[in-house]
Amino acid sequence: MPRAGLTRTRVAEEAAVMADHVGLGKLTLAALADRLGVRQPSLYKHIDSMAGLHRDIAVNAKRELGEVLARAAVGRSGAESISAMSRAYRAWALEHPARYEASNLMPAPGDSEDESVSMAAIGVIADVLTAYRLEGDDAIDAIRAFRSTLHGFVSYETAGAFAMSADIDRSFERLVDGFVIALTRWADTKPRPEAESG
């Protein structure tokens, strides 16, 4: 029986749930239509193509990840905030593998909504990194390092590439600790405001 009140948002949400189970690349419109209780042509009232559906999943995923990071950072600062955000990032990515994959899709040129949610998630990271007094290119370096560090670890973990006996959680914590040490050293090379004014 068709579901009442089907919307573009609902279609994208159900597609994301399916994709997390079968994989983003294995998501089909036929299976999605069956899940929603509608005929496949009815989906085109809400999406224009599979690429468009992937785009909607990506936008929602980026927004969700940004909210997850923001909640993790609330009431914390510096190393504590980075550690909390890192754990939240990893947990969300492992729980929602397809959404995580979609969150790394680049916005299409001129897609202001996608660009906005992408920058909002990055903005959460940037706000936390202000504790290390990194500005301009230094801040961009730190943001890139944070994202690359976590993405690399999570990508290997989700691919089942960590087959050695050492505890994966411990490895992750050490990775994050190492990133914090690197940030601290970067910050230590910056002149203190007092020195700049003196």
Image (cartoon, helix red, strand yellow):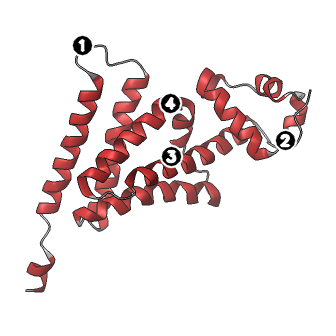
Quarter of the image that includes the N terminus: top right
Q: Which of pointers 3 and 4 lies earlier in the amino acid sequence? A: 3
Task: Determine crowd level at label 3: few under 14, some 14-19, many 20+ residues with C-alpha closer than 10 A.
Answer: many
Is the C-beta separation of discs 1 and 3 under 8 Å? no
Q: Residue at x 35, y 43 (%)?
A: 86
Task: Determine crowd level at label 2: few under 14, some 14-19, many 20+ residues with C-alpha closer than 10 A.
Answer: some
Quarter location, residue 128: bottom left
Q: Tell me: residue 60, above or below residue 124.
A: above
Q: Label 4: which residue?
A: 95
The amino acid type of the residue labelled 2 equals: Leu
The percent position of residue 46, horizontal first and vertical second, equals 82, 43
The amino acid type of the residue labelled 1 equals: Ser
Q: Which of pointers 4 and 1 lies earlier in the amino acid sequence? A: 4
Q: CA distance from mark 2 to mark 1?
A: 47 Å
Q: Which of pointers 2 and 3 lies earlier in the amino acid sequence? A: 2
In the picture, the disc for residue 65 is 3
Is the C-beta separation of discs 4 and 1 under 8 Å? no
Q: Residue at x 16, y 57 (%)?
A: 186
Residue 145 shows in the view: no
